[in-house]
Amino acid sequence: MSILKNRVIAVVAGTAVLGFATTTGAVAAKAITGADIKNFSITSADLASGSVTSAKIQNGTISATDLNADLKAKVNASAKNGTDGVDGKDGKDGAALADSFAGGGTIVDLGGSFKTRKTEVGTINLPEAGTYMINAFGFFDTVAADSVRTDGTHLQLAVRGPVSEADAFGQDFGTCFTSAFPAGDREATCQSVRVITVTEATELTVIGFGYNDDQSSTGSGSFTVTADVSAIKVG
């Protein structure tokens, strides 16, 4: 082989080596990005021990589901109850039944003066000063279907306070009337609800009474009243 031919071969070989080196350098200079890695192809086996530190984890991306059972147990064991908060203010006392009455009797008189002809059927007691709700329900019936009476009888249930020289009828703590009592063997009802305040312990009287449209006393003793009265302390 001639000297000239040997030189040509050497130049060609050198050029090929130079081209390979240049290409390799270009690949090394270009960084590998996430686009060059197939999703989910990197596993823990591909990572060097200790290579992932807290600085490489975005804050707030680790949740309780990412922790193993042992770590969760340690976290829970280290947790402690906080300091007790300040007690709140005491609430107001709830409503309480102070007293009640259930009973009745025959309404002896109709018409005339309430003060002298009313029929007292029971009492309830307000045990102390305060505000009370007085609920009074009256059920009225005839003594017999053929009891003597007249049309236009209005029966009354009343709850009154103590009688005094200043108030001969007693303070009204609840009053209700029926409409005109129906003919025949029928019944009627009425109800009163009042909220009142007393300054001391007070006894209330439950009363049955009634009036006729014609102002007569016809029907006296012909009607009964059954009263259900309660006093609930609300303040």
Image (tube, rainbow, N blue to C red):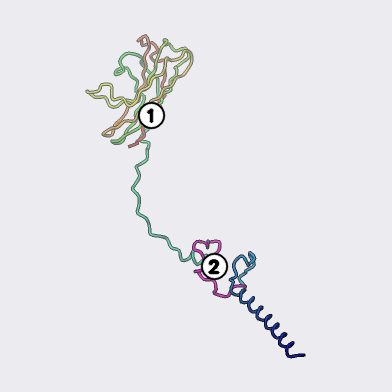
Please, which residue is most extreme toward the right here?
Answer: 1
Q: Pinpoint residue 102: horizontal percent, then vertical percent.
A: 40, 29
72 drawn magenta? no
Q: Nearer the viewer, mark 2 or mark 1?
A: 2
Using the image as rendered, state which of residue 120 and residue 17 is in the foreground: 17
Please, which residue is most extreme toward the left here?
Answer: 165
Check residue 70 in the rendering and tell me which mark sits there, or answer none.
2
Q: Pinpoint residue 100: horizontal percent, then vertical percent.
A: 38, 32
Q: Quadrant of the N terminus?
A: bottom right
Q: Is residue 227 left or right of residue 26?
A: left
Quadrant location of residue 112?
top left
Quadrant location of residue 129?
top left
Q: Pinpoint residue 124: horizontal percent, then vertical percent.
A: 34, 30
Q: Is residue 132 above or below residue 149?
A: below
Q: Is residue 143 left or right of residue 6?
A: left
Residue stretch in magenta: 46-70
Characterize the local packing of mark 1: few (<14), some (14-19) or many (20 or more) Cα atoms within 10 angstroms: some
Using the image as rendered, state which of residue 141 and residue 41 is in the foreground: 41
Q: Is residue 57 left or right of residue 120?
A: right
62 drawn magenta? yes
| Residue located 54% across and 71% down the image | 52
Q: Is residue 89 left or right of residue 7?
A: left
Spatial CA distance of label 2 from label 1 is: 65 Å
Using the image as rendered, state which of residue 137 and residue 80 is in the foreground: 80
Q: Is residue 68 above or below residue 148?
A: below
Identify residue for label 1: 135
Secondary structure mostly taken by the magenta-highlighted segment of the chain = loop
| Residue located 25% across and 23% down the image | 167
Sooner in the amino-acid sequence: mark 2 or mark 1 = 2
| Residue located 55% across and 61% down the image | 65
Which amino acid, mark 1? Answer: Asn
Which amino acid, mark 2? Answer: Asp
